Image: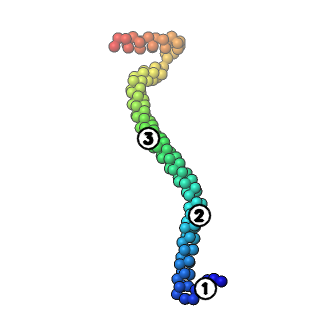
């Protein structure tokens, strides 16, 4: 019969220590391998998703930047058109002022008593046209 219990306590302690270390090393390696096998596909999927999200963010950031530039250009164009419109309006008022003065003069005239309003208005218009043509 084989005696498996050593008679020397130091040798038994050394064998116990070596076997414990080998068992612990095997457990650590096996745990690492199982953990890596479990998490590697999930990590790769998460990295791919993060890359896709980063690409989408960069695309949206570029689109937003172009939109902001377009809005800024629209604001500048609006201001330019507003100023041009104000200038055109002032010019139109200046050009219309003589005609408005003439219209006010015609409206301020009173008809002679007993005269035909249409005939009198025709005479006033004819006189105004003759004055205008003579200038």
Which of the marked residues, 1 or 3, is nearer the chain's N terminus? 1
Q: CA distance from mark 1 to mark 3?
A: 86 Å
Give residue 79's quadrant in the image: top left
Q: Residue 91, percent across and down?
A: 39, 27
| Nearer to me, 15 or 52 | 15
Q: In the picture shown, does residue 27 fall above or below 130?
A: below
Which of the marked residues, 2 or 3, is nearer the chain's N terminus? 2
| Nearer to me, 133 or 39 | 39
Residue at label 2? 34
Label 3 sits on a secondary structure element that is: helix
Looking at the image, is mark 1 or mark 3 nearer the viewer?
A: 1
Q: What is the number of the mark on residue 69? A: 3
Residue beneath the point at 45% across and 14% down: 124
Residue beneath the point at 45% across and 21% down: 103
Question: Is residue 97 in view?
Answer: no
Q: Residue 129, percent across and down?
A: 41, 12
Residue at label 1? 5
Label 1 sits on a secondary structure element that is: loop
Query: Mark 3 and mark 1 in contact (Cβ < 8 Å)?
Result: no
Q: CA distance from mark 2 to mark 3?
A: 53 Å
**Mark 3 packing: few (<14 Cα in 10 Å), some, or many (20+)?**
few
Q: CA distance from mark 1 to mark 2?
A: 35 Å
| Nearer to me, 118 or 19 | 19
Give residue 40's quadrant in the image: bottom right
Question: Is residue 49 in view?
Answer: yes
């Amino acid at each position: 019969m084989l005696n498996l219990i050593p008679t020397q306590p130091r040798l038994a302690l050394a064998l116990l220590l070596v076997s414990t270390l080998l068992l612990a090393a095997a457990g650590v390696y096996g745990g690492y391998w199982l953990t890596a096998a479990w998490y590697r596909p999930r990590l790769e999927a998460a990295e791919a998703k993060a890359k896709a999200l980063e690409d989408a963010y960069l695309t949206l950031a570029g689109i937003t930047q172009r939109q902001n530039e377009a809005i800024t250009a629209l604001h500048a164009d609006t201001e330019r058109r507003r100023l041009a419109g104000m200038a055109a309006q002032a010019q139109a008022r200046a050009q219309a002022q003589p005609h408005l003065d003439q219209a006010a003069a015609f409206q301020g005239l009173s008809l002679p008593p007993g005269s035909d309003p249409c005939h009198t208005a025709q005479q006033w218009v004819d006189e105004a046209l003759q004055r205008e043509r003579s200038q």
